[in-house]
């Protein structure tokens, strides 16, 4: 199970739950502060925990995520409405149509589907 460090779990959960629609449970708290929890859906599970030390270490490559939403356009609009800065949707020469965002912890998220699976709009 991937463990994802976070500088501010409460703030990060907005992306994971409200943005991506995952469920949070198994909260761990220390002195009332959220220091860890599980986020998941039916097929994947992540453990989020409070990052030790500096917020985002310098020269940190980080973790990258690739998501394949059912509706790429609706997902982009949803995340944009939540205030996340999303890239334009682009058709890539390798057959994927994608957009990107960087979350509050500095992690890169790519959202894409096979270009030939795009609905006609």
Image (cartoon, rainbow, N blue to C red):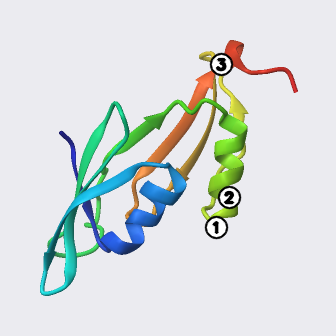
Q: Position of residue 82 (x, y in %)?
A: 63, 64
Discs 2, 1 touching: Cβ within 8 Å: yes
Q: Earlier in the sequence, mark 3 or mark 2?
A: 2
Residue 57: which quarter of the image? bottom left
**Would you call the spot at circle 3 few (<14 residues within 10 Å), some (14-19), or many (20 or more)?**
few
Numbered tag placed on residue 93 in the rendering: 3
Is residue 61 among the parts visible in the rendering? Answer: yes
Q: Earlier in the sequence, mark 3 or mark 1?
A: 1
Q: Position of residue 114 (x, y in %)?
A: 62, 18
Q: How far apart, in angstroms, are the residues tagged by discs 2 and 1?
A: 5 Å
Residue 94: which quarter of the image? top right
Pointer 1: what residue?
A: 83
Residue that sits furthest to the right in the current view: 121
Q: Nearer the viewer, residue 25 or 94?
A: 25
Q: What residue sits 72% from the left and 39% below the top?
A: 73
Numbered tag placed on residue 80 in the rendering: 2
Mark 3 element type: loop
Above-or-below relation of 87 to 59: above
Mark 1 element type: loop
Above-or-below relation of 6 to 95: below
Q: What residue sits 68% from the left and 15% below the top?
A: 117
């Amino acid at each position: 199970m991937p463990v994802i460090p976070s500088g501010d779990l409460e703030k990060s959960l907005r992306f994971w739950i409200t943005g991506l629609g995952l469920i949070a449970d198994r909260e761990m708290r220390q002195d009332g502060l959220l220091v860890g929890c599980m986020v998941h859906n039916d097929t994947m599970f992540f453990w989020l925990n409070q990052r030790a030390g500096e917020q985002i270490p310098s020269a940190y490559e980080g973790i990258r995520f690739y998501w394949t939403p059912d509706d790429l356009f609706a997902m982009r609009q949803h995340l944009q409405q939540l205030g996340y800065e999303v890239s334009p949707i682009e058709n890539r020469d390798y057959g994927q149509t994608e957009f990107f965002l960087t979350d509050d912890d500095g992690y890169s998220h790519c959202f894409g589907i096979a270009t030939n699976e795009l609905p006609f709009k």
